[in-house]
Image (cartoon, rainbow, N blue to C red):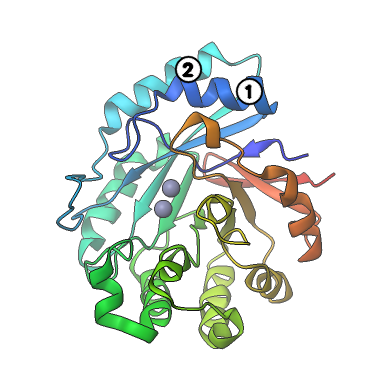
Amino acid sequence: MILADYHFHSSFSSDSETPLVNQFEAGINEHNLKYMCVTDHLDYDWCEDPEGFDFMLDMEAYLEEIKKLREQFKDKASIKTGVELGIQSHVKSDLDAFYAKYKDKLDFIIASTHLVEHMDPYYPEYFEKFKDKSILRYLEVTLDNLDVFKDFSVYGHLDYVVRCSKRFGIEYKPEEYMDIYDAILKKIISLGKGIEINTAGFKAGLDHAHPHPSVLKRYKELGGEIITIGSDAHESKHIAYNFSVVPDILKAAGFKYYTVFSELKPEFIKID
Ligand SMILES: [Zn+2]
Ligand SMILES: [Zn+2]
Protein backbone atom coordinates (compact mmCIF):
# COMPACT_ATOMS: atom_id res chain seq x y z
CA MET A 1 0.00 0.00 0.00
CA ILE A 2 1.29 3.44 -0.95
CA LEU A 3 1.25 5.94 1.92
CA ALA A 4 2.41 9.07 0.11
CA ASP A 5 0.93 11.41 -2.51
CA TYR A 6 3.65 13.86 -3.54
CA HIS A 7 2.00 15.64 -6.44
CA PHE A 8 -1.38 17.33 -6.24
CA HIS A 9 -2.88 20.77 -6.67
CA SER A 10 -5.37 23.06 -4.99
CA SER A 11 -7.10 26.37 -5.67
CA PHE A 12 -3.72 28.10 -5.29
CA SER A 13 -3.11 26.76 -8.83
CA SER A 14 -4.77 28.56 -11.75
CA ASP A 15 -6.34 25.34 -12.98
CA SER A 16 -7.86 24.00 -9.75
CA GLU A 17 -10.85 25.14 -7.72
CA THR A 18 -10.37 22.67 -4.88
CA PRO A 19 -9.66 24.14 -1.43
CA LEU A 20 -6.40 22.75 -0.09
CA VAL A 21 -8.05 21.44 3.07
CA ASN A 22 -10.29 19.17 0.95
CA GLN A 23 -7.23 17.54 -0.63
CA PHE A 24 -5.74 16.67 2.75
CA GLU A 25 -9.07 15.41 4.05
CA ALA A 26 -9.50 13.14 1.03
CA GLY A 27 -5.99 11.74 1.31
CA ILE A 28 -6.12 11.13 5.04
CA ASN A 29 -9.73 10.03 5.49
CA GLU A 30 -10.34 8.12 2.26
CA HIS A 31 -6.90 6.76 1.36
CA ASN A 32 -5.11 6.53 4.72
CA LEU A 33 -2.18 8.52 3.38
CA LYS A 34 0.52 9.32 5.92
CA TYR A 35 2.62 11.65 3.76
CA MET A 36 1.10 14.39 1.63
CA CYS A 37 2.96 17.10 -0.21
CA VAL A 38 1.01 19.76 -2.09
CA THR A 39 2.76 20.97 -5.26
CA ASP A 40 0.85 23.93 -6.67
CA HIS A 41 1.82 25.35 -10.04
CA LEU A 42 4.25 28.16 -10.68
CA ASP A 43 5.02 28.76 -14.35
CA TYR A 44 6.83 31.99 -15.13
CA ASP A 45 5.80 33.52 -18.45
CA TRP A 46 2.93 31.18 -19.25
CA CYS A 47 1.72 31.25 -22.85
CA GLU A 48 -1.35 33.05 -24.10
CA ASP A 49 -3.98 30.79 -22.63
CA PRO A 50 -7.44 30.22 -24.13
CA GLU A 51 -8.75 29.61 -20.60
CA GLY A 52 -7.08 32.71 -19.19
CA PHE A 53 -4.78 30.93 -16.74
CA ASP A 54 -1.50 32.54 -15.72
CA PHE A 55 -0.09 29.84 -13.39
CA MET A 56 1.41 32.32 -10.97
CA LEU A 57 1.43 31.39 -7.29
CA ASP A 58 0.79 33.64 -4.29
CA MET A 59 3.63 32.14 -2.25
CA GLU A 60 3.02 34.04 0.97
CA ALA A 61 -0.67 33.06 1.19
CA TYR A 62 0.21 29.51 0.12
CA LEU A 63 2.87 29.06 2.81
CA GLU A 64 0.54 30.50 5.43
CA GLU A 65 -2.29 28.11 4.54
CA ILE A 66 -0.02 25.06 4.53
CA LYS A 67 1.36 26.02 7.93
CA LYS A 68 -2.16 26.23 9.32
CA LEU A 69 -3.21 22.88 7.85
CA ARG A 70 0.00 21.16 8.93
CA GLU A 71 -0.95 22.05 12.50
CA GLN A 72 -4.56 20.94 11.96
CA PHE A 73 -3.59 17.49 10.66
CA LYS A 74 -0.39 16.99 12.64
CA ASP A 75 -1.59 13.87 14.48
CA LYS A 76 -2.79 12.21 11.28
CA ALA A 77 -0.24 12.80 8.53
CA SER A 78 3.02 14.43 7.63
CA ILE A 79 2.11 17.45 5.52
CA LYS A 80 4.82 18.97 3.35
CA THR A 81 5.28 22.07 1.26
CA GLY A 82 6.07 21.62 -2.40
CA VAL A 83 5.83 23.43 -5.68
CA GLU A 84 5.68 22.37 -9.34
CA LEU A 85 7.87 24.71 -11.36
CA GLY A 86 7.42 24.97 -15.11
CA ILE A 87 10.87 25.16 -16.70
CA GLN A 88 11.66 27.34 -19.72
CA SER A 89 15.16 28.47 -20.61
CA HIS A 90 14.31 32.17 -20.84
CA VAL A 91 12.94 32.30 -17.28
CA LYS A 92 16.11 30.92 -15.68
CA SER A 93 16.74 34.07 -13.63
CA ASP A 94 13.18 33.96 -12.24
CA LEU A 95 13.61 30.30 -11.27
CA ASP A 96 16.96 30.95 -9.61
CA ALA A 97 15.56 33.95 -7.71
CA PHE A 98 12.56 31.91 -6.59
CA TYR A 99 14.82 29.13 -5.33
CA ALA A 100 17.10 31.52 -3.46
CA LYS A 101 14.12 33.18 -1.78
CA TYR A 102 12.10 30.09 -0.81
CA LYS A 103 14.49 27.12 -0.57
CA ASP A 104 14.44 27.16 3.23
CA LYS A 105 10.65 27.00 3.26
CA LEU A 106 10.19 24.16 0.79
CA ASP A 107 10.31 20.40 1.28
CA PHE A 108 10.01 19.36 -2.34
CA ILE A 109 10.34 20.83 -5.84
CA ILE A 110 9.00 19.20 -9.01
CA ALA A 111 10.49 20.57 -12.22
CA SER A 112 8.22 20.05 -15.22
CA THR A 113 8.20 20.67 -18.94
CA HIS A 114 4.82 22.27 -19.56
CA LEU A 115 5.65 24.49 -22.53
CA VAL A 116 7.82 23.80 -25.56
CA GLU A 117 8.91 26.87 -27.52
CA HIS A 118 6.23 28.69 -25.51
CA MET A 119 3.51 26.34 -26.75
CA ASP A 120 1.35 24.09 -24.61
CA PRO A 121 1.16 20.56 -26.08
CA TYR A 122 -2.37 20.43 -24.75
CA TYR A 123 -3.49 22.46 -27.77
CA PRO A 124 -3.45 21.47 -31.50
CA GLU A 125 -1.00 24.17 -32.67
CA TYR A 126 1.81 22.26 -30.97
CA PHE A 127 1.14 19.09 -32.97
CA GLU A 128 0.48 21.06 -36.14
CA LYS A 129 3.95 22.53 -35.82
CA PHE A 130 5.99 19.47 -34.82
CA LYS A 131 3.86 16.70 -36.38
CA ASP A 132 5.56 13.29 -35.99
CA LYS A 133 8.44 14.97 -34.12
CA SER A 134 6.06 16.18 -31.39
CA ILE A 135 7.10 13.64 -28.77
CA LEU A 136 10.81 13.92 -29.61
CA ARG A 137 10.74 17.71 -29.44
CA TYR A 138 9.17 17.58 -25.97
CA LEU A 139 11.93 15.25 -24.77
CA GLU A 140 14.68 17.37 -26.37
CA VAL A 141 13.43 20.42 -24.50
CA THR A 142 13.26 18.41 -21.28
CA LEU A 143 16.92 17.44 -21.75
CA ASP A 144 17.83 21.10 -22.31
CA ASN A 145 15.79 22.12 -19.26
CA LEU A 146 18.06 20.01 -17.06
CA ASP A 147 20.78 22.57 -17.75
CA VAL A 148 18.45 25.48 -17.07
CA PHE A 149 17.42 24.62 -13.51
CA LYS A 150 19.09 21.97 -11.37
CA ASP A 151 17.72 22.68 -7.92
CA PHE A 152 14.72 20.39 -8.20
CA SER A 153 13.89 17.22 -6.24
CA VAL A 154 12.29 15.21 -9.05
CA TYR A 155 11.50 15.86 -12.71
CA GLY A 156 7.73 15.65 -13.26
CA HIS A 157 5.68 13.44 -15.61
CA LEU A 158 8.55 12.72 -18.04
CA ASP A 159 6.36 11.70 -20.97
CA TYR A 160 3.49 14.10 -20.27
CA VAL A 161 3.28 14.95 -23.99
CA VAL A 162 1.84 11.52 -24.79
CA ARG A 163 -1.27 12.41 -22.79
CA CYS A 164 -1.93 14.83 -25.61
CA SER A 165 -0.37 13.14 -28.64
CA LYS A 166 -2.88 10.29 -28.49
CA ARG A 167 -5.67 12.76 -29.31
CA PHE A 168 -3.77 13.79 -32.44
CA GLY A 169 -3.29 10.24 -33.69
CA ILE A 170 0.41 9.93 -32.86
CA GLU A 171 1.28 6.51 -31.54
CA TYR A 172 3.77 6.36 -28.67
CA LYS A 173 6.44 3.67 -28.88
CA PRO A 174 8.83 4.43 -26.02
CA GLU A 175 11.54 2.21 -27.52
CA GLU A 176 11.87 4.73 -30.40
CA TYR A 177 13.00 7.35 -27.91
CA MET A 178 15.40 5.34 -25.75
CA ASP A 179 18.50 7.31 -26.80
CA ILE A 180 17.06 10.56 -25.57
CA TYR A 181 15.53 8.92 -22.51
CA ASP A 182 18.99 7.58 -21.66
CA ALA A 183 20.47 11.06 -21.91
CA ILE A 184 17.68 12.55 -19.76
CA LEU A 185 17.82 9.81 -17.12
CA LYS A 186 21.63 9.77 -16.91
CA LYS A 187 21.63 13.52 -16.43
CA ILE A 188 19.00 13.39 -13.68
CA ILE A 189 20.91 10.60 -11.89
CA SER A 190 24.23 12.44 -12.21
CA LEU A 191 22.64 15.52 -10.62
CA GLY A 192 21.59 13.35 -7.64
CA LYS A 193 17.93 14.01 -8.45
CA GLY A 194 14.93 11.77 -9.14
CA ILE A 195 11.78 11.27 -11.16
CA GLU A 196 8.18 10.61 -10.23
CA ILE A 197 5.58 8.07 -11.16
CA ASN A 198 2.55 10.19 -12.03
CA THR A 199 -0.75 8.31 -12.18
CA ALA A 200 -2.59 11.04 -14.10
CA GLY A 201 -1.63 9.10 -17.23
CA PHE A 202 -4.34 6.59 -16.33
CA LYS A 203 -6.80 9.40 -15.70
CA ALA A 204 -6.08 10.73 -19.20
CA GLY A 205 -7.03 7.36 -20.70
CA LEU A 206 -3.54 5.93 -21.22
CA ASP A 207 -2.78 2.37 -20.21
CA HIS A 208 0.23 3.50 -18.21
CA ALA A 209 1.32 6.09 -15.68
CA HIS A 210 4.02 8.65 -16.51
CA PRO A 211 6.59 7.63 -17.41
CA HIS A 212 5.89 4.45 -19.37
CA PRO A 213 7.05 1.29 -17.49
CA SER A 214 9.90 0.72 -19.96
CA VAL A 215 11.31 4.17 -19.11
CA LEU A 216 10.93 3.44 -15.40
CA LYS A 217 12.81 0.18 -15.86
CA ARG A 218 15.58 1.93 -17.76
CA TYR A 219 15.88 4.54 -14.99
CA LYS A 220 16.43 1.76 -12.44
CA GLU A 221 18.93 -0.04 -14.70
CA LEU A 222 20.95 3.15 -15.03
CA GLY A 223 21.14 3.45 -11.24
CA GLY A 224 18.12 5.64 -10.48
CA GLU A 225 16.82 5.23 -6.93
CA ILE A 226 14.82 8.37 -6.17
CA ILE A 227 11.19 7.91 -7.19
CA THR A 228 8.23 9.77 -5.73
CA ILE A 229 4.57 8.95 -6.36
CA GLY A 230 1.99 11.54 -7.32
CA SER A 231 -1.61 11.60 -8.50
CA ASP A 232 -1.41 15.11 -9.99
CA ALA A 233 -4.96 15.52 -8.63
CA HIS A 234 -6.68 18.85 -9.21
CA GLU A 235 -9.89 17.53 -7.59
CA SER A 236 -10.29 15.57 -4.35
CA LYS A 237 -11.72 12.52 -6.11
CA HIS A 238 -8.37 12.05 -7.86
CA ILE A 239 -6.10 12.10 -4.79
CA ALA A 240 -4.09 8.84 -4.71
CA TYR A 241 -5.66 7.98 -8.09
CA ASN A 242 -5.08 4.34 -9.02
CA PHE A 243 -2.33 4.00 -6.41
CA SER A 244 -3.35 0.36 -5.87
CA VAL A 245 -1.46 -0.61 -9.05
CA VAL A 246 1.69 1.37 -8.19
CA PRO A 247 3.47 -1.20 -5.97
CA ASP A 248 3.42 -3.75 -8.80
CA ILE A 249 4.61 -1.19 -11.36
CA LEU A 250 7.51 -0.20 -9.11
CA LYS A 251 8.44 -3.79 -8.26
CA ALA A 252 8.33 -4.81 -11.93
CA ALA A 253 10.86 -2.05 -12.64
CA GLY A 254 13.10 -3.32 -9.85
CA PHE A 255 12.35 -0.83 -7.08
CA LYS A 256 12.14 -1.86 -3.43
CA TYR A 257 11.63 1.65 -2.07
CA TYR A 258 9.83 4.82 -3.01
CA THR A 259 10.73 8.30 -1.88
CA VAL A 260 9.35 11.17 0.12
CA PHE A 261 11.11 14.47 0.69
CA SER A 262 11.54 16.66 3.73
CA GLU A 263 13.45 19.96 3.63
CA LEU A 264 14.49 19.04 0.07
CA LYS A 265 16.17 15.80 1.20
CA PRO A 266 15.03 12.32 0.15
CA GLU A 267 13.80 9.66 2.58
CA PHE A 268 13.02 6.10 1.51
CA ILE A 269 9.95 4.00 2.31
CA LYS A 270 9.87 0.28 1.70
CA ILE A 271 7.22 -0.91 -0.76
CA ASP A 272 5.04 -3.54 0.86
ZN1 LIG B 1 2.66 19.26 -14.55
ZN1 LIG C 1 0.90 18.86 -11.59
Question: Does 238 appear above or below 270?
Answer: above
The C terminus is located in which quarter? top right
**Residue appearing at x 27%, y 39% in the figure:** 14
Residue 233 lies, in percent from the top left, at 49, 40
Is residue 77 among what the camera can see?
Answer: no
Direction from residue 52 to residue 206 in the image, left or right? right
Per the image, label 1 sits on a secondary structure element best described as: helix
**Residue appearing at x 24%, y 67% in the figure:** 119
Question: Does 25 appear above or below 232?
Answer: above
Q: Quadrant of residue 124?
A: bottom left
Of tags 2 and 1, the one toward the viewer is 1
* Residue picked out by circle 2: 69
Direction from residue 266 to residue 23 in the image, left or right? left
Residue 225 lies, in percent from the top left, at 69, 61
Cα distance, mark 2 to mark 1?
12 Å
Q: Quadrant of residue 114?
A: bottom left
Residue count near mark 2 (Cα–Cα under 10 Å), binned few <14, some 14–19, many ≥20: some
Residue 218 lies, in percent from the top left, at 68, 75
In the rendered structure, which amino acid carries the disc numbered 2? Leu
Mark 1 sits near ligand 2, with its Cβ under 8 Å away: no
Residue count near mark 1 (Cα–Cα under 10 Å), binned few <14, some 14–19, many ≥20: some
The N terminus is located in which quarter? top right
* Residue picked out by circle 1: 28
Per the image, label 2 sits on a secondary structure element best described as: helix
Mark 2 sits near ligand 2, with its Cβ under 8 Å away: no
Depth check, front residue: 184 or 116: 116
